[in-house]
Amino acid sequence: MEKNDNNSFWQRGGNNMYDKLVIVESPSKSKTIENYLGKEYHVTSSKGHIRDLATSGKDGLGIDQENGYKPKYVISKDKKTVVKELKEAVKEAKTVYLATDPDREGEAISWHLAEVLGLDEDDTNRIVFNEVTKNAVIDALNHPRKIDKNLVKSQETRRVLDRIIGFKLSKLLQKKIKSKSAGRVQSVALRLIVEREREIDAFIPKEYWKIKAHFLKDDIDFSAELSKKGNSKIEINNETQATEIFESLEKHFTVQSVKKTKKKKESKPPFITSTLQQEASSKLGFKAKRTMMIAQKLYEGIALEDETVGLITYMRTDSTRLSDTFVTSATEYIRDKYGKNYIGHVKINKKKENVQDAHEGIRPTSALRTPESVKPYLSQDEYKLYALIYARALASLMAPSQFDATSIVLNNNDYLFNASGSILQFDGYLRVYGQYEKQTNEILPVLSENEMIESYQIEKTQHFTKPPARYSEAKLIKEMEELGIGRPSTYAMIIDTIQTRGYVELIDKAFKPTESGILTCDKLTQFFNDIINVEYTAEMEKELDNIAEGEDDYFDAIDGFIKKFQPLLDEANEKMEVIAPKKTGEKCPECGHDLVERKGRYGMFVACENYPECKYIKKEKIEPEFTGETCPNCGSPMVYKTGRYGKFEACSNYPKCKYIKNGKKKQEPIMTDEVCPNCGSPVVIKKGRWGEFKACSNYPKCKTIIK
């Protein structure tokens, strides 16, 4: 790294074709950035992490438990070629910049790159930018800094803790109850879902009644609901009480009071990761994982008509801060587009205890790139998400909406009925965010105090209290954020993991725990309640934040956890009962032992309980499904079969006759919104011997399979 940092970016340079190397994480981002820089620059990517903890050593944890829990890292098998290419590129460059993502994970990747590529870790070779735009990249190159070792230690601590819990707990659960895995945060998320389901099961509905009066005046139909008797709030618990009140009411009501007030409603701050995932879920129907994949693409760069540019700032953030530059330009845009009276104020960033790093909120990189102007260059889902992000950021700087609110109290034999309405007088921020936050005018007629008004209908209706709702994806993310468990980069992964493991299932867009999920949660709660709980997990997140700030220590965090965790693990290994596989009632034809149901890599199957001494597996005989046609080659009946590419029609006289109707028609792969982490090509869904799987579309050049 050259030391003359006072020189401007454009003054620095050499005589070689390129003497400056910039390393980012993503291939697509590297292409975007290289377009911004001169010929003396070469931009390449690490394609994510290049190293991970080894699986050697005691318990396969990859840490030296006798030497300060020192981690042992190995280059990932699929990154050896990448590392070789990076080393060659480093040899060609006089200066190397590490430009990985601006968070703890990105900081750790830069540190791993420095170690593997032989760079000086104390050099000022780390550059950070929150948006992939020319100005932001050039500014970052003008202000390099050292790798933040505290951020690296925080990420390293998290990784080691997750490895210890993941390996040891998963091994225990697999041995004892045949569960697939357990994790530090995923197990707490599962516990939230299971405990909510138990609340629902234990809920006893409570009866209550409502009494409403309906009125029509000046062609305005409105209603009022019974709320009080005199000055006391009224509760109606059964039909007898409801009937008694109902029969004491007259059709004429007296207007007891009319209150009119002007109300304002402020816009919300720009998105952070959790609120983006919540709003995209409720407004667009996107799952958290899908939201983050689309946002990643919008951040890394979109090819427009005359440039390739990142459309949004970095999407993993806990901060709602907006840069002064964006505030100024967006305010000017609001003034020019909507008028001076639509300009609001910058929302004060009230920093929460667990806010991660000094990021901005999620916003467009330019207020001038309206959703409509970039729509031709985006997919439908990319456009929807960008429009949502754009509207939220712009609305956060706009004036509040204003309403005229009216509240009316009607008296009938000392029973008080309330009616309320509001009329939007000034749309304010709703001018751009109204489609996501619709307001309805609830109009009331003009009424004056002591006026008599006649009801055309009074009704009493029976109701029952409802149990708490199951967690939707949006509500689960909100709950995790409020409880302080997990971080922006982990919410989508946590939810994806508990679904993939079969611990929860989606019922009407809400999570319901499966039998396996409930069993796993119950065993973890029984034996590991001291660590698999909200409070301890939140405290651990605070400890990781303290390490990032240099206020806590890696060794103390790991040592304290192991001393708390290991006794619980030892007790569970000794006392947790092994759940025997379910017997089918049949006997093994080879050794006479019972046949049992087992869960394997590809689902349930029936096998001998005497495994591994007896390896008998029952193969179900499948009756052929005839198509009603005959084979044109041999005249045998045609049947349906299932093969590598799905269902097809073939001759039942196989293998003597190998006729297949329409030949072997290869099914075209299904495109996804994911990008291959190794080469940047689209990821597709393919069908293989064991069913569907995700892989790089650039096969056979790239053999990446997404697990």
Image: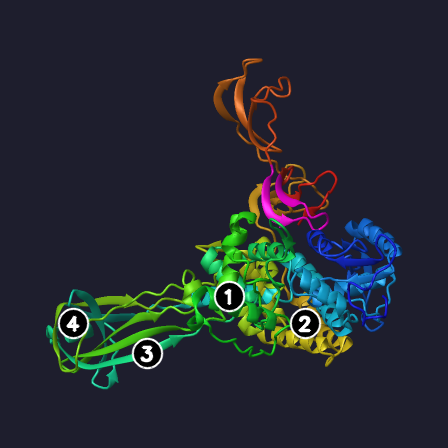
Disc 4 designates what residue? 243
Disc 2 designates what residue? 568
Residue at the (71%, 65%) spot, across then down? 105
Say which element carries label 2: helix
- Vertical comparison of 272 with 649: above or below: below
Identified by mark 2, the residue type is Leu
Identified by mark 4, the residue type is Thr
Q: Is residue 673 magenta?
A: yes
Q: CA distance from mark 2 to mark 3?
A: 59 Å
Decide which of 538, 9 is in the foreground and name it.
Answer: 9
Decide which of 663, 532 is in the foreground and name it.
Answer: 663
Residue at the (65%, 65%) spot, across then down? 130
Q: CB atoms at circles 1 and 4 under 8 Å apart?
A: no
Residue 100 lies in quadrant: bottom right
Counting the numbered discs, the total is 4
Q: Earlier in the sequence, mark 4 or mark 3?
A: 4
Which mark is drawn over residue 262? 3
Q: Is residue 640 visible?
A: yes
Q: CB atoms at circles 1 and 3 under 8 Å apart?
A: no
Q: Earlier in the sequence, mark 2 or mark 4?
A: 4
Image quadrant occupied by the N terminus: bottom right
Q: Of tags 4 and 3, which is closer to the observer?
A: 3
| Helix, strand or loop for the magenta stretch, by majority | strand
Which mark is drawn over residue 333? 1
Q: Is residue 611 visible?
A: no
Say which element carries label 3: strand
Identified by mark 3, the residue type is Lys
x and y, in percent, of residue 623 in the image: 53, 29
